[in-house]
Amino acid sequence: MASLDTAPKISPTNPATSVFGHDLLASVVVFLVALPLCMGIAIASNMPIAAGLVTGIIGGIVVGFLAGSPLQVSGPAAGLAVLVWQLVEKFGIPMVGVIVFFAGIIQILAGVFKLGQWFRAVSPAVIHGMLAGIGILILASQFHVMFDGAPLGSGIANLLGMPATVANAIAGGGAPLSAGLIGVLTIAAIFGWASLAPKSLKVIPAPLVGVAVGMLAAAFLSPEGIKYVVVPEKIFENLRSGATLPSFESLLRIFDPAVLIGAISVAFIASAETLLCATAVDAMHSGPRTKYDRELSAQGIGNALCGLLGGLPMTGVIVRSGANVEAGAKTRASAILHGVWLLMFVVLIPWTLGYIPMAALAAVLVYTGYKLAYPKIVPALLKYGKAEVFIYAVTIATIVSTDLLKGVVTGLVLSLGKLLYAFSHLEVRKDEDVSQNRIDLHFDGSATLVRLPILARALEALTPGSDVHVHLGELDYVDHACLDLLTNWEKQHMATGGTLTMDWETLEGKYHERHGTGPNNGKSA
């Protein structure tokens, strides 16, 4: 991302006009980024393109006005496309609206009860593994759509079927080959623009350039039989009846365990992705910080409306939000205006969408999937140990081989297991020099009640009367029970004529730093 100081500066002579000018420019940039993604993510979710546009409009106008993160932009997210596809396959399109509605209600309640920070308490390895797994699934499924085909089913089937799709297109020629060539040209244009475009033109988003190149290629080559985006005469006519509430019968289905799990899954994943995105956006600018509970409630209101209107679920989206900050946005007006431009486009010139080849939109999603799946995070995770990379890899593998929910749950269980291991693992290593009557003890891990028997056995096995030196460099934490054990053992050992050398101040610090206490806690200095 561009650094903050590359953004246009506010004029001191007329700051209000300057701020609005920056927000107006940024809103146009975000609109151009959002338009192809709203449509493409709807297609990747097995939903009508209008569903994606509705979510983009609500994410801009409604959530933009209410948001706790003023510069974050909300809309349909690639991160939920796979889950929505699975919900459509299982329940049908009408019930997806009910699930999204109740997911929004859950988010509203979470915001009211101030659970925003808790939704952020998910291991980065799980979050990045989830996004990478989603990226692989999107890339693999949309690769077949890029050749005017259809996804083959599971993630594994889509991955394994990619070579056959290319071979069949080359062998058979016709529309699949033409569509594939348009898709490849679209991806090449995206990569080329992202890496080679002059800095002054970087404001034009690469996905939009890719779609434009795909449209031009289709217009000039006029390939027969390729698929184009299907635009109904009234673009919203295939949505459910306006803002009418779901039927009483469909609302009652929330008590169906499978439907309830779907709503909780959408709420959890959307909230985690939104709040992590908000944190990333905060790092890009020096303006107001995110109010996480307000952001969570705003997302809930947006998703509840999307459910009622037959839209896709929404999250805060890093691609649009990053473009917003880089384009110089200063206030929430930019996010709101981008929703207004989407609405005006849909109302005034929806017919232009019919000129977009499906292969071009699919190519945008193949590129998006690649960006999500690229393992750039691995070196950063390695800094925190191989266990983090293992959790990341297992989360990806489980998502691709089963489904999104199982993958996330598996990652969370592994993270919890790692945490429990960290708080229950203790290694006591002994180096004994008999000639000097000296024993060096090295503690590694956490000395807690769970591992107290190991510590007790290690101390009891020491030679009475020896000169014991305890090294605390690898000790992460000691609880009160183990601290008490060491204190009592010191008295017993000294009674045998032995000595104990240990940095008691450091040891007590290992206890106090976890409990927020100290020698003077609660006392005046």
Image: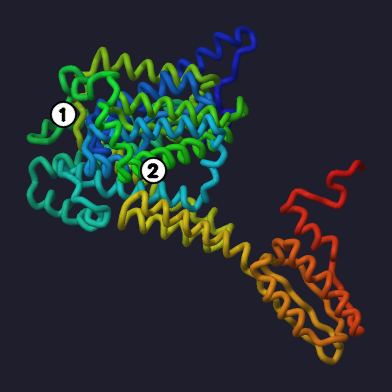
Give the residue at the far bottom of this rendering: 435
Residue 350 in view in this figure: yes
Q: Quadrant of residue 145?
A: top left
- Count the marks: how many? 2
Residue 510, horizontal then vertical, whole percent: 76, 59
Residue visible at 51% across and 57% down? 415
Reading the image, the residue beneath label 1 is 220
Which element type, helix, strand or loop, lies under badge 1? helix
Of badges 2 and 1, the one in the foreground is 2
Residue visible at 51% across and 41% down? 119
Residue 127, horizontal then vertical, whole percent: 46, 48
Reading the image, the residue beneath label 2 is 265
Frontmost residue, 438 versus 259:
259
Q: Amino acid at mark 1?
A: Phe
Q: Amino acid at mark 2?
A: Ser
Frontmost residue, 153 versus 497:
497
CA gap between label 2 and label 1 equals 45 Å
Residue visible at 30% across and 28% down? 311
137 sits to left or right of 285: left
Q: Quadrant of residue 257?
A: top left
Residue 92, horizontal then vertical, whole percent: 21, 38
Q: Earlier along the polypeptide chain: callout 2 or callout 1?
A: 1
CA neighbours of label 2 inside 10 A, class few (<14), some (14 to 19), many (20+) = some
Frontmost residue, 416 versus 48:
416
Question: Do the residues bearing badges 2 and 1 touch, measured as CB atoms within 8 Å?
Answer: no
CA neighbours of label 1 inside 10 A, class few (<14), some (14 to 19), many (20+) = few
Q: How is the image coloured?
A: rainbow
State whether residue 65 is above or below residue 69: above
